[in-house]
Amino acid sequence: MTRRESREKAVCYLYEYACQPELSVDTIVQTAVEERGENTSGFARMLFETVIDNIDEVDARISDAAENWSLKRISKVSLAILRLATAELCCLPEPTPDEIAVNEALELARLLDSEKAVPFINGVLAKIIKIKG
């Protein structure tokens, strides 16, 4: 599984988490593998766990950067993509380079979300990068 495919899988896990936040990381991943026969990777799981382990920080960064948008107003797909990219930028021991994290997020938005989501996600991530310095 490529890193891009792993990111896509992590976004799917994050979407499921947004819909059912009472489920654990293990439950979401096991359900995908055992009941739906999906493949996963250690990288996808690590990204998913990183977001969940840092969800308060990640959501605070998104809230600060998404002016006039509450997290509840952001589509679940866009929020999953923003959470993943924010965690890659700010929460990994070795953060993903800014350009790569943004490019991957925009590619995921083009694949999984509406075309209107692309400039929104780009703007929020640009502000997160600016704020983090």
Image (cartoon, rainbow, N blue to C red):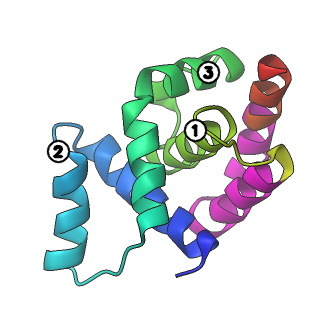
Visible in this render: residue 51? yes
Of the two numbered discs 3 and 2 on the same chain, state the one appearing first in sequence.
Answer: 2
Q: Position of residue 5 (x, y in %)?
A: 55, 74
- The dominant secondary structure in magenta is helix
* Residue drawn at point x = 34 percent, y = 42 percent: 18
* Residue drawn at point x = 43 percent, y = 21 percent: 56
Q: Which residue is mark 1?
A: 87
Q: Position of residue 10 (x, y in %)?
A: 45, 59
* Residue 118 higher or lower than 31, as above or below: above
Report the amino acid beneath label 3: Arg
Image quarter of residue 103: bottom right
Label 2: state its secondary structure.
loop
Q: Position of residue 49 (x, y in %)?
A: 38, 46
Marking on residue 116: none
Report the amino acid beneath label 2: Leu
* Residue 129 higher or lower than 103, as above or below: above
